[in-house]
Image (cartoon, rainbow, N blue to C red):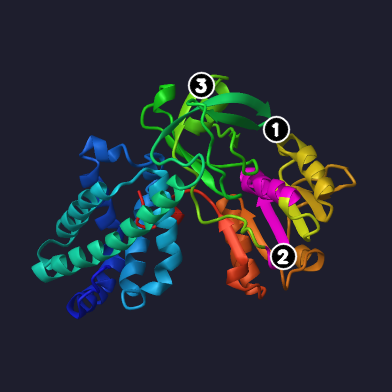
Amino acid sequence: MTKPLSSETVTIVKATVPVLTEYGSAITAAMYKRLFQDPEIAALFNQANQKSGTQVHALAAAILAYAQNIENLAELGPAVERIAQKHIGYAILPEHYPYVATALLGAIGDVLGDAATPAILTAWSEAYWFLADILKGREGQIREDLMAQEGGWTGWRRFVIAERQKESEIITSFILRPEDGRPVLRHKPGQYLTFRFDAAGRLGLKRNYSISCGPNNDHYRITVKREPEGDASVFLHDKAVIGTVLECTPPAGEFFLPKKLERPVVLLSGGVGLTPMVSMLETLADQHAGHPVYYVHGTASRDTHAFGNHVRELAARHGTTTVTTFYDQSSGESEVHSGFITLDWLSQNTPFAEADFYLCGPRPFLRFFVSGLTQAGVSPDRIHYEFFGPADEVLAA
C-alpha cells in the first residue's frame, strides 16, 4: 500500500502552486530536454507531441493540477486512469520512472535556481514517487488483466496488414492480423491501439489509432485519414501494402461502450472521429438489438464521408438506430443535413435529457460539444469523449 504523503510535503507542494503557475512550462521543457539526452528514454515518447510544444504545456498543467489537488487526490482519479492507459500503450515500465524523477527534479533546479531549496526538492520527490507508485500499481493490474484474457499480451507485438479498403477520398481502412497467427484480445469498443513503425522502416515513429471494428479474436481494423503533414498517415496511405509489418501494444483507453447500457446512446462524431463510433455501432448491432441508439455524424462532404453504407447496414440490422448525417456544405441529398451539428438540433432530435453521449472528433469539435452539453444541463457523467494528442496526456509519456 502506498505510504501517505507527509503533512510537511503537502504544505510545501501547495505552497509551490504560484511558482508552478508562472514557471511550469519552463520546468517541463527543461525536464524533456534532460530526458531526451538518453536515446533509449527518448525512444519511449511520441516525438510528434513534442514538436509543437503543446506536450510541454499539457504536462505543466497536469503538474499544477496535482499540486492544487494534493489534499483531494480523488479528483485526479480519471486523469490517473488516462495516464495508466497511455503508459500501457507506450509500453512504459516501472524501471522507466526513475528517469523521469531525476529529470523533473533536475529541471526544477535548472529553472528556479536558488529558490529550489532542499526542502522543496525533497517534497516534490516524495510527491512524485507517491503518484508514481499509484500509477505503477494500476498499470500492473491492467497488465495482469490483459494476460488473463484469450489473445492477451503486453509490450510490442508484430501485426501484418492483411487488407486495405478505401473508405473515402481521404480515409482508408487497414485490417491487421498478428504475425504469429495466434488470437488477438477482444477489445472494448472505443479503445485504441498504439503503433510503432520501426519494423516498417520508420524508426521512432509512433501513433495511436482507434479500433474501428467490433471486438473479435481474429483481427483489428484501423481507419486512417491522410493528413498531408502527417508522417504516419502519409506512410500508411502511400507506402504501406499488404504484408507490411507494424508493431502495436494491446488495446487501451478508458473511453469505451460499457457492456451494460442503462440509458439511450448518442454517438456523436466529426470527420475521422467516427472510427470508435463504428466499433461501438457494430457492437450495438451484435449485442444490444432494440436499444435506442442515435448515430450523428458530421463531415465536409460525400467525398470525405467514410462508412456511410456500412453504418446504414448496421442500423438496419440493429433495428432501433437512427442515423443522421451532416455535410458542411449543401449536397442536394434529401437524407443529408446541410451545415453543422448544433446543440439545438441535438436537444430537439435526441433524448437529450437522459442519454449517454459518446463523442470523438477534432479538438474544436470536442471543445464545443463537451462544454456545450455541460452548459445545456447534461450531467458530466453522461458525457464520454476521446481525442488524441498531448492535451489528454497528463504526466504521460
Query: Which image quarter: residue 314?
Result: top right
Label 3 – label 1 distance at C-alpha: 20 Å
Looking at numbered disc 1 in the image, what kind of residue is underneath it? Glu
Q: Position of residue 108 (x, y in %)?
A: 19, 59
Q: Which residue is drawn at 67% across and 51% down?
A: 269
Along the viewing direction, whichever of 321 and 208 lies nearer the viewer: 321
Magenta run includes residue 348: no
Residue range of the region highlighted in magenta in the rendering? 261-286
In the figure, 185 relative to 319: above or below?
A: above
For this view, does 157 lie left or right of residue 277? left
> Which residue type carries mark 3?
Thr
Name which of mark 3 and mark 1 comes first in the sequence: 1
Query: Which numbered disc flags the more N-terminal residue, 3 or 2?
Result: 3
Give, as a three-letter code, the residue at label 2.
Answer: Leu
Separation of residues labelled 1 and 2 (CA atoms): 28 Å
Are there few (<14), some (14-19), or many (20+) residues within 10 Å of tag 3? some
Estimate the x, y position of residue 184 in percent, counting from the top left: 53, 37
* 290 left or right of 343 in image: right
Which label belongs to residue 244?
3
Does residue 290 lie above or below 388 as drawn? below
Circle 2 crowding by C-alpha within 10 Å: few under 14, some 14–19, many from 20: some
The secondary structure making up most of the magenta span is helix
Q: Give the foreground label among 3 and 2.
A: 3
Q: Which residue is drawn at 82% across and 55% down?
A: 322
Residue carrying label 2: 343
Q: Can you identify the residue that label 1 sits on?
A: 167
